[in-house]
Protein backbone atom coordinates (compact mmCIF):
# COMPACT_ATOMS: atom_id res chain seq x y z
CA UNK A 1 0.00 0.00 0.00
CA UNK A 2 2.77 2.42 1.00
CA UNK A 3 6.25 1.97 -0.32
CA UNK A 4 9.39 4.03 0.15
CA UNK A 5 12.24 3.26 -2.22
CA UNK A 6 15.71 4.72 -1.74
CA UNK A 7 14.25 7.89 -0.23
CA UNK A 8 16.69 10.74 0.39
CA UNK A 9 15.43 13.87 2.10
CA UNK A 10 17.32 17.08 2.76
CA UNK A 11 16.65 20.09 4.97
CA UNK A 12 18.60 22.73 3.10
CA UNK A 13 22.07 21.30 2.78
CA UNK A 14 21.57 18.73 5.58
CA UNK A 15 21.17 15.25 4.17
CA UNK A 16 18.73 13.67 6.66
CA UNK A 17 17.13 10.55 5.14
CA UNK A 18 19.72 8.41 3.43
CA UNK A 19 18.23 5.77 1.17
CA UNK A 20 15.21 4.72 3.21
CA UNK A 21 13.28 1.65 2.08
CA UNK A 22 10.07 0.85 3.89
CA UNK A 23 6.74 -0.76 3.29
CA UNK A 24 3.29 -0.77 4.89
CA UNK A 25 0.72 -3.23 3.57
CA UNK A 26 -3.05 -2.89 3.59
CA UNK A 27 -4.43 -3.08 7.14
CA UNK A 28 -0.99 -3.63 8.63
CA UNK A 29 0.53 -2.03 11.75
CA UNK A 30 4.16 -1.14 11.18
CA UNK A 31 6.38 0.29 13.85
CA UNK A 32 9.22 2.72 13.18
CA UNK A 33 11.57 3.05 16.12
CA UNK A 34 14.61 5.20 16.68
CA UNK A 35 16.38 7.53 19.06
CA UNK A 36 16.05 11.30 19.19
CA UNK A 37 17.06 12.83 15.88
CA UNK A 38 17.15 9.49 14.03
CA UNK A 39 14.94 10.83 11.24
CA UNK A 40 11.54 9.38 12.19
CA UNK A 41 9.59 12.62 11.90
CA UNK A 42 11.43 13.45 8.68
CA UNK A 43 10.26 10.09 7.32
CA UNK A 44 6.68 10.92 8.30
CA UNK A 45 7.05 14.42 6.78
CA UNK A 46 8.32 12.92 3.54
CA UNK A 47 5.28 10.64 3.39
CA UNK A 48 2.73 13.39 4.08
CA UNK A 49 4.57 15.89 1.88
CA UNK A 50 5.89 18.51 4.32
CA UNK A 51 9.44 17.46 3.44
CA UNK A 52 9.31 15.95 -0.05
CA UNK A 53 12.27 13.68 -0.87
CA UNK A 54 15.09 15.03 -3.00
CA UNK A 55 15.43 11.62 -4.64
CA UNK A 56 13.86 8.18 -4.45
CA UNK A 57 10.19 7.27 -4.70
CA UNK A 58 7.14 7.06 -2.50
CA UNK A 59 4.12 5.21 -3.84
CA UNK A 60 0.72 4.92 -2.20
CA UNK A 61 -1.85 2.48 -3.56
CA UNK A 62 0.23 2.17 -6.70
CA UNK A 63 0.37 5.93 -7.35
CA UNK A 64 3.65 7.85 -7.24
CA UNK A 65 3.12 10.51 -4.57
CA UNK A 66 6.78 11.57 -4.22
CA UNK A 67 6.06 15.13 -5.30
CA UNK A 68 2.32 15.28 -4.79
CA UNK A 69 1.05 18.30 -2.79
CA UNK A 70 0.16 17.68 0.86
CA UNK A 71 -3.57 18.21 0.36
CA UNK A 72 -3.81 15.66 -2.42
CA UNK A 73 -2.04 13.05 -0.34
CA UNK A 74 -4.58 13.63 2.41
CA UNK A 75 -7.40 13.15 -0.08
CA UNK A 76 -5.74 9.97 -1.29
CA UNK A 77 -6.22 8.56 2.22
CA UNK A 78 -3.13 9.40 4.28
CA UNK A 79 -3.76 11.03 7.68
CA UNK A 80 -1.30 12.28 10.26
CA UNK A 81 -1.37 12.32 14.03
CA UNK A 82 1.54 14.72 14.43
CA UNK A 83 4.26 14.66 17.04
CA UNK A 84 3.24 16.99 19.86
CA UNK A 85 -0.44 16.56 18.77
CA UNK A 86 -0.84 20.07 17.32
CA UNK A 87 -4.37 20.59 18.57
CA UNK A 88 -5.60 24.09 17.66
CA UNK A 89 -5.71 25.90 21.02
CA UNK A 90 -8.37 28.45 20.01
CA UNK A 91 -10.77 25.95 18.46
CA UNK A 92 -13.16 23.79 20.44
CA UNK A 93 -12.83 20.02 20.57
CA UNK A 94 -15.63 19.71 18.05
CA UNK A 95 -14.09 22.28 15.71
CA UNK A 96 -10.71 20.58 15.98
CA UNK A 97 -12.31 17.28 15.00
CA UNK A 98 -14.08 18.80 12.04
CA UNK A 99 -10.98 20.48 10.59
CA UNK A 100 -9.92 17.57 8.43
CA UNK A 101 -13.21 15.78 7.89
CA UNK A 102 -13.72 13.81 4.73
CA UNK A 103 -17.10 12.10 5.12
CA UNK A 104 -17.53 8.60 3.78
CA UNK A 105 -20.78 6.60 3.90
CA UNK A 106 -20.48 4.17 6.81
CA UNK A 107 -17.19 5.74 7.83
CA UNK A 108 -15.97 7.81 10.73
CA UNK A 109 -18.01 10.84 11.79
CA UNK A 110 -18.41 12.87 14.98
CA UNK A 111 -20.75 10.34 16.58
CA UNK A 112 -18.39 7.47 15.97
CA UNK A 113 -15.40 9.41 17.29
CA UNK A 114 -17.41 10.35 20.39
CA UNK A 115 -18.36 6.69 20.83
CA UNK A 116 -14.68 5.74 20.84
CA UNK A 117 -13.71 8.69 23.06
CA UNK A 118 -16.70 9.53 25.32
CA UNK A 119 -14.48 12.03 27.10
CA UNK A 120 -14.38 14.14 23.93
CA UNK A 121 -18.15 14.21 23.78
CA UNK A 122 -18.24 15.56 27.33
CA UNK A 123 -15.69 18.18 26.37
CA UNK A 124 -16.87 19.01 22.86
CA UNK A 125 -17.31 22.71 23.67
CA UNK A 126 -13.95 23.11 25.42
CA UNK A 127 -11.09 24.93 23.77
CA UNK A 128 -8.04 22.96 22.67
CA UNK A 129 -5.96 25.00 25.11
CA UNK A 130 -8.08 23.62 27.96
CA UNK A 131 -7.35 19.95 27.44
CA UNK A 132 -5.01 17.56 29.22
CA UNK A 133 -2.26 15.85 27.23
CA UNK A 134 -4.30 12.65 26.99
CA UNK A 135 -7.38 14.53 25.80
CA UNK A 136 -5.31 16.35 23.19
CA UNK A 137 -4.03 13.03 21.93
CA UNK A 138 -7.62 11.78 21.64
CA UNK A 139 -8.47 14.89 19.61
CA UNK A 140 -5.44 14.37 17.36
CA UNK A 141 -6.41 10.75 16.73
CA UNK A 142 -10.10 11.62 16.31
CA UNK A 143 -9.22 14.37 13.84
CA UNK A 144 -7.21 11.89 11.76
CA UNK A 145 -10.09 9.38 11.82
CA UNK A 146 -12.55 12.06 10.64
CA UNK A 147 -10.63 12.07 7.33
CA UNK A 148 -11.52 8.39 6.89
CA UNK A 149 -7.97 7.49 5.93
CA UNK A 150 -6.73 4.08 4.84
CA UNK A 151 -3.35 4.83 6.43
CA UNK A 152 -2.67 6.76 9.62
CA UNK A 153 0.82 7.93 10.53
CA UNK A 154 1.15 8.36 14.30
CA UNK A 155 4.26 10.22 15.37
CA UNK A 156 5.04 9.35 19.00
CA UNK A 157 1.46 9.22 20.30
CA UNK A 158 2.70 8.24 23.76
CA UNK A 159 5.07 11.19 24.16
CA UNK A 160 4.58 13.04 27.45
CA UNK A 161 1.66 10.88 28.64
CA UNK A 162 1.39 8.98 31.92
CA UNK A 163 1.69 5.17 31.72
CA UNK A 164 -2.03 4.53 32.39
CA UNK A 165 -3.05 7.01 29.70
CA UNK A 166 -0.62 5.36 27.27
CA UNK A 167 -2.22 1.97 27.99
CA UNK A 168 -5.65 3.41 27.26
CA UNK A 169 -4.43 5.16 24.11
CA UNK A 170 -2.96 1.94 22.82
CA UNK A 171 -6.21 0.06 23.39
CA UNK A 172 -7.84 2.58 21.05
CA UNK A 173 -5.03 2.31 18.53
CA UNK A 174 -5.44 -1.49 18.52
CA UNK A 175 -9.16 -1.05 17.93
CA UNK A 176 -8.51 1.27 14.97
CA UNK A 177 -6.10 -1.29 13.53
CA UNK A 178 -8.63 -4.12 14.02
CA UNK A 179 -11.17 -2.07 12.07
CA UNK A 180 -8.77 -2.34 9.12
CA UNK A 181 -6.91 0.97 8.98
CA UNK A 182 -3.20 0.58 8.30
CA UNK A 183 -1.00 2.35 10.85
CA UNK A 184 2.59 3.49 10.78
CA UNK A 185 3.45 3.88 14.42
CA UNK A 186 6.50 5.95 15.35
CA UNK A 187 7.93 5.57 18.84
CA UNK A 188 11.30 5.71 20.58
CA UNK A 189 10.80 2.16 21.80
CA UNK A 190 7.60 1.14 23.46
CA UNK A 191 6.43 -2.36 24.30
CA UNK A 192 2.80 -1.63 23.44
CA UNK A 193 3.81 -0.48 19.96
CA UNK A 194 6.18 -3.39 19.39
CA UNK A 195 3.58 -5.96 20.48
CA UNK A 196 0.97 -4.88 17.98
CA UNK A 197 3.32 -4.43 15.02
CA UNK A 198 3.53 -6.95 12.20
CA UNK A 199 6.77 -5.35 11.05
CA UNK A 200 9.37 -3.30 12.88
CA UNK A 201 11.97 -0.93 11.48
CA UNK A 202 14.71 0.71 13.49
CA UNK A 203 16.16 3.91 12.12
CA UNK A 204 19.46 5.48 13.04
CA UNK A 205 21.11 8.53 11.46
CA UNK A 206 18.61 8.61 8.62
CA UNK A 207 18.95 4.97 7.61
CA UNK A 208 17.03 1.80 8.43
CA UNK A 209 19.45 -0.29 10.47
CA UNK A 210 17.20 -3.20 11.39
CA UNK A 211 14.03 -4.73 10.01
CA UNK A 212 11.99 -7.72 11.16
CA UNK A 213 8.58 -9.30 10.73
CA UNK A 214 8.88 -10.95 14.12
CA UNK A 215 8.73 -8.70 17.18
CA UNK A 216 10.45 -11.48 19.15
CA UNK A 217 13.55 -10.91 17.04
CA UNK A 218 13.87 -7.50 18.62
CA UNK A 219 16.13 -8.61 21.45
CA UNK A 220 17.18 -6.61 24.47
CA UNK A 221 20.64 -6.49 22.94
CA UNK A 222 19.35 -4.93 19.71
CA UNK A 223 17.19 -2.46 21.60
CA UNK A 224 20.13 -1.48 23.73
CA UNK A 225 22.53 -1.19 20.80
CA UNK A 226 20.24 0.70 18.40
CA UNK A 227 17.82 2.46 20.71
CA UNK A 228 19.80 2.88 23.90
CA UNK A 229 17.01 1.36 26.00
CA UNK A 230 16.01 -1.91 27.53
CA UNK A 231 19.35 -2.87 29.00
CA UNK A 232 19.28 -4.93 32.16
CA UNK A 233 20.72 -3.48 35.31
N1 LIG B 1 13.30 21.73 9.86
C1 LIG B 1 14.54 21.23 10.00
N2 LIG B 1 15.62 21.86 9.49
C2 LIG B 1 16.87 21.35 9.61
N3 LIG B 1 17.14 20.19 10.25
C3 LIG B 1 16.12 19.51 10.78
C4 LIG B 1 14.77 20.00 10.70
N4 LIG B 1 13.95 19.11 11.33
C5 LIG B 1 14.77 18.12 11.79
N5 LIG B 1 16.06 18.37 11.47
C6 LIG B 1 17.22 17.49 11.79
O1 LIG B 1 17.01 16.26 11.14
C7 LIG B 1 17.42 15.16 11.96
C8 LIG B 1 16.28 14.20 12.11
O2 LIG B 1 15.23 14.82 12.86
P1 LIG B 1 13.81 14.17 13.09
O3 LIG B 1 12.93 15.20 13.67
O4 LIG B 1 13.37 13.51 11.83
O5 LIG B 1 14.18 13.04 14.16
P2 LIG B 1 13.21 12.13 15.03
O6 LIG B 1 13.70 10.72 14.83
O7 LIG B 1 11.79 12.40 14.72
O8 LIG B 1 13.57 12.58 16.52
P3 LIG B 1 12.61 12.69 17.84
O9 LIG B 1 12.56 11.31 18.40
O10 LIG B 1 13.36 13.61 18.72
O11 LIG B 1 11.29 13.22 17.41
C9 LIG B 1 17.93 15.79 13.25
O12 LIG B 1 19.32 15.87 13.17
C10 LIG B 1 17.31 17.16 13.27
O13 LIG B 1 18.14 18.07 13.93
MG1 LIG C 1 10.24 13.09 15.80
Image (cartoon, rainbow, N blue to C red):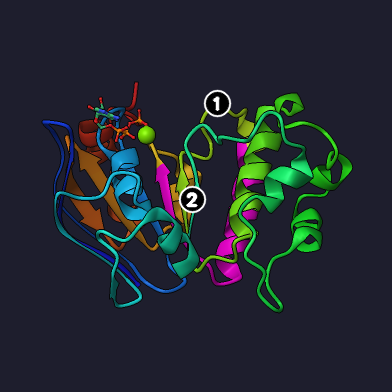
Q: Position of residue 186 (x, y in %)?
A: 40, 45
Q: Position of residue 170 (x, y in %)?
A: 59, 48
Residue 13, percent from left and from top: 11, 31
**199 vs 225: above or below:** below
Q: Seen in the image, is 42 located left or right of residue 142?
A: left
Question: Is residue 174 one of those drawn in magenta?
Answer: yes
Task: State which quarter of the image contains the N terminus.
Answer: bottom left
Q: Is residue 84 above or below residue 184?
A: above
Instruction: Give the residue at mark 2.
Output: 80
**Residue 54 is covered by the magenta coloring:** no
Depth order, front residue of 2/66:
66
Quadrant that contains the C terminus: top left
Residue under circle 1?
160
Please name the residue shown 49% across and 66% down the image.
75
The secondary structure type at the circle numbered 2 is strand
Mark 2 closeness class: few <14, some 14–19, many ≥20 residues within 10 Å: many
Within 10 Å of disc 1 (Cα), the crowding (few <14, some 14-19, many 20+) is few
Locate ligand 2 by image quadrant. Answer: top left
- Give how far apart the Cα atoms at labels 1 and 2 are: 18 Å
Residue range highlighted in magenta: 166-186
Secondary structure under the numbered disc 1 in the rendered image: loop
Amino acid sequence: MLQLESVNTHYGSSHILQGVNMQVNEGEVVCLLGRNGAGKTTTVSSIVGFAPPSSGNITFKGVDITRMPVERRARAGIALVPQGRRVFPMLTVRENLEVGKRPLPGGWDLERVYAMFPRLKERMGNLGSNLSGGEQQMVAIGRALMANPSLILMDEPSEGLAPLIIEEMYRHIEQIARDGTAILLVEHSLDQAIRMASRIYIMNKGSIMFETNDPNELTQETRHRLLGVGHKE
